Amino acid sequence: MDNLTITFGGLVAVDRVSINVKPGSIFSIIGPNGAGKTTIFNCISGLYKPDSGAIFFKGEDIIGLKPHRIAQKGISRTFQNIELFSRMTVMENLMLGRHIHMKTGIWTGATFFRRGSSAAKDEIKHRERVEHIIDLLDLQAARNQFVGGLPYGTQKLVELGRALALEPKLLLLDEPSAGMNSEEKQDLIFWVKDIQDELGVTILLIEHDMKMVMDISDRILAINFGKPITEGNPEEVQKHPEVLKAYLGEDDIE
């Protein structure tokens, strides 16, 4: 991402932000509410079109592409507010994350119950992929439960699972631990590391829990009012005087 800038009604939400995320790494963006973090995610995922700058993914500038085209290229995301179908089961929500990989349409899908049909084979393949995600995130007990009846922390995991179902190369996590208790947050740290190590997924993270950020990040960018303050490894960032003053507070990073 190079010199990304976007304004809303004269307000500069993101001001010439540049980052270079190493493949296979965990890169975190920190800052107070309103700093422009989610706006950056919205630009990367195609929801917003920036005024200037470039966003390169696999050597291609993806600015101007529709969100579904960006997803097809291997970028998926979670949201601050849960965006699940509450009256569908965990399995059904995760299967929706496979939609860009499904080859069967509505007419071929009607032949699903015919043994050996292309739709049946397609369904089996995608369910196997989803079962792997369910095992990875320890969602076995919730597999056939309606999402709306699950605890908030579990719903956040389901949303993470749906993003993984797309088989991303780059995963954007927008405050994944929000609403979780301390035990759930600790489990989430292990799952995020597993996603990085076992699946080889590059992760771009927005997170307010500074302990989590410092524990799992390879590099961190701190921003305020849309402008970069500093970038570096966790040790460097947590010692930066402007970061200590604006975001963390010394008690938060001990």
Image (tube, rainbow, N blue to C red):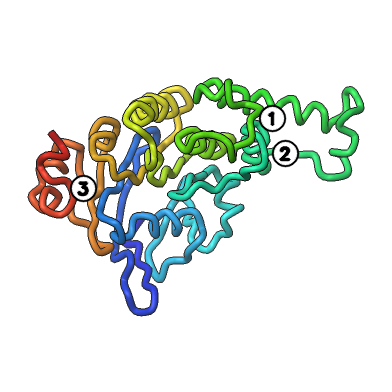
The 10 Å Cα crowd at callout 1, few under 14, some 14 to 19, many 20 or more, is some
Tell me the residue at 80%/39% (across/down).
104
Comparing marks 1 and 3, which lies closer to the viewer? 1
Residue bearing the label numbered 2: 102
Query: Of callouts 1 and 3, which one flags the residue occurring earlier in the amino acid sequence?
Result: 1
Three-letter code for the amino acid on which mark 1 is drawn: His
- Can residue 123 be seen here? yes
Query: Of callouts 1 and 2, which one flags the residue occurring earlier in the amino acid sequence?
Result: 2
Position of residue 38 relative to residue 145, above or below, is below
Determine the image quadrant of residue 172: top left
Residue 165, percent from left and from top: 58, 35
Residue bearing the label numbered 1: 126
Of residue 215 and residue 27, the one placed in the foreground of this image is 215
Position of residue 50 relative to residue 80, above or below, is below
Distance from Cα at disc 1 to Cα at disc 2: 8 Å
Q: Residue furthest bottom?
A: 10
Q: Residues at badges 1 and 2 in contact (C-beta under 8 Å)? A: yes
Tell me the residue at 45%/35% (across/down).
153
Distance from Cα at disc 3 to Cα at disc 2: 39 Å
**Side of 226 relative to 128 (left or right):** left
Three-letter code for the amino acid on which mark 2 is drawn: Met
Position of residue 136 relative to residue 69, above or below, is above
